[in-house]
Image (cartoon, rainbow, N blue to C red):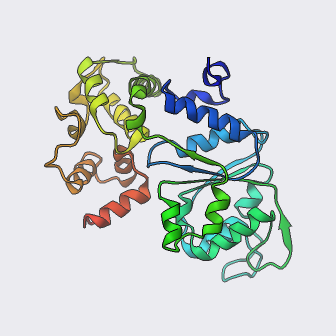
């Protein structure tokens, strides 16, 4: 029997599935959690990169210390250094007191940088220095501060390609990728789809206070045949939205039209623009719910809106 099944992970209930790829990820989490070096987690949007980071933390010696997640894409370039390293009083207009940064808050714990490929180049050098020597200066400060932090990072971009275009430092990439976990897409672990569906049905029904529905065989076929570009996050949101019908049996009519199409994938006539508009209309133009329904991050949704010339201020 593999270690994946004989030695459960702490917090392992979020790693649903018995496929070979997911068992390999469990083993990699268990192995890398024992160390203390940086880890780079790669994978498409919705594959569970933050969940893997949490599992690494929960199974590490730092498990009782803080786990601090930060989405780098959500930080304006001008605020990156002050957010991570803090700032001294008077460092800039409005800095009326000394303020701790994320490295202070995560002291003795784990700092998780999601979408690390979005870090501005001028800040990447400072992260490299902290990895090589765990001390830094606050913005506007002169004193060096030491903090004990394990750095976990994640990206859905190809950082190796970004080093070629000089958008990401090669030395920082090699430092982050000294520990690497490449997450499989849901298409690569399709044998886990029905187990995940059952799990999301149970959790969603419990949250709504309704009986857990059974899943019609036709729905099972559709779910297995669909390409899942948004991966596990998209599956979860599809099931959660279907449960709002409070059905005793989950039927094809409870699924979005692009999933319940008889071919089990978005019809070729539906462009990405049409798919986004359909999701926006279904969610009354609420950007957060639309991003969830599509299995995207909010940052990805805004990029796709701009690419498809959709006025998201509507």
Q: Is residue 84 left or right of residue 216?
A: right
Of the pair 97 and 188, the residue shown nearer to us = 188
Relative to 14, say whether 67 is above or below.
below
Q: Position of residue 186 (x, y in %)?
A: 41, 37
Q: Residue at x 63, y 41 (%)?
A: 54
Of the pair 296 and 221, the residue shown nearer to us = 221
Residue 91: in sight, yes or no?
A: yes
Q: Is residue 189 left or right of residue 107?
A: left
Q: Residue at x 27, y 66 (%)?
A: 311
Of the pair 270 and 39, the residue shown nearer to us = 39
Residue 100: in sight, yes or no?
A: no
Relative to 302, say whether 167 is above or below.
below
Q: Position of residue 178 (x, y in %)?
A: 67, 53
Quarter of the picture containing the C terminus is bottom left
Q: Position of residue 59 (x, y in %)?
A: 71, 35
Quarter of the picture containing the N terminus is top right
Q: Residue at x 74, y 73 (%)?
A: 87
Relative to 146, say whether 232 is above or below.
above
Q: Residue at x 84, y 67 (%)?
A: 145
Labels in figure, total:
0
Q: Is residue 53 left or right of residue 301?
A: right
Q: Is residue 270 left or right of residue 39?
A: left
């Amino acid at each position: 029997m593999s270690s994946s099944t004989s030695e459960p992970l702490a917090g392992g209930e979020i790693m649903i599935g018995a496929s070979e790829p997911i068992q390999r990820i469990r083993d990699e989490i268990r192995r890398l959690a024992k160390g203390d070096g940086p880890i780079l987690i790669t994978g498409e949007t919705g594959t569970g990169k933050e969940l893997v980071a949490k599992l690494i933390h929960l199974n590490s010696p730092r498990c009782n210390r803080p786990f601090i997640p930060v989405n780098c894409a959500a930080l304006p370039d001008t605020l990156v250094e002050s957010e991570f390293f803090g700032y001294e009083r008077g460092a800039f207009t409005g800095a009326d007191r000394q303020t701790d940064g994320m490295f202070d808050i995560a002291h003795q714990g784990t700092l998780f940088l999601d979408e690390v490929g979005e870090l501005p180049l001028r800040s990447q050098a400072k992260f490299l220095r902290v990895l090589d020597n765990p001390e830094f200066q606050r913005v506007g400060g002169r004193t060096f501060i030491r903090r004990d932090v394990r750095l976990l990072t994640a990206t859905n971009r190809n950082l190796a390609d970004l080093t070629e275009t000089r958008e990401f430092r090669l030395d920082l990439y090699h430092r982050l990728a000294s520990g690497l976990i490449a997450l499989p897409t849901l298409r690569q672990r399709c044998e886990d789809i029905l187990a995940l569906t059952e799990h999301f049905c149970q959790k969603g029904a419990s949250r709504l206070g309704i009986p857990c529905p059974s899943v019609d065989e036709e729905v099972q076929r559709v779910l297995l045949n669909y390409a899942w570009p948004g991966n596990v996050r998209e599956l979860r949101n599809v099931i959660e939205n279907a449960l709002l019908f409070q059905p005793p049996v989950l039927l094809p009519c409870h699924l979005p039209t692009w999933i319940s199409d008889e071919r089990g994938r978005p019809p070729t006539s539906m462009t990405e623009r049409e798919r986004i508009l359909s999701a926006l209309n279904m969610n009354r133009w609420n950007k957060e719910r639309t991003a969830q329904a599509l299995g995207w991050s909010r940052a990805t949704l805004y990029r796709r809106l701009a690419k498809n010339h959709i006025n998201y201020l509507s």
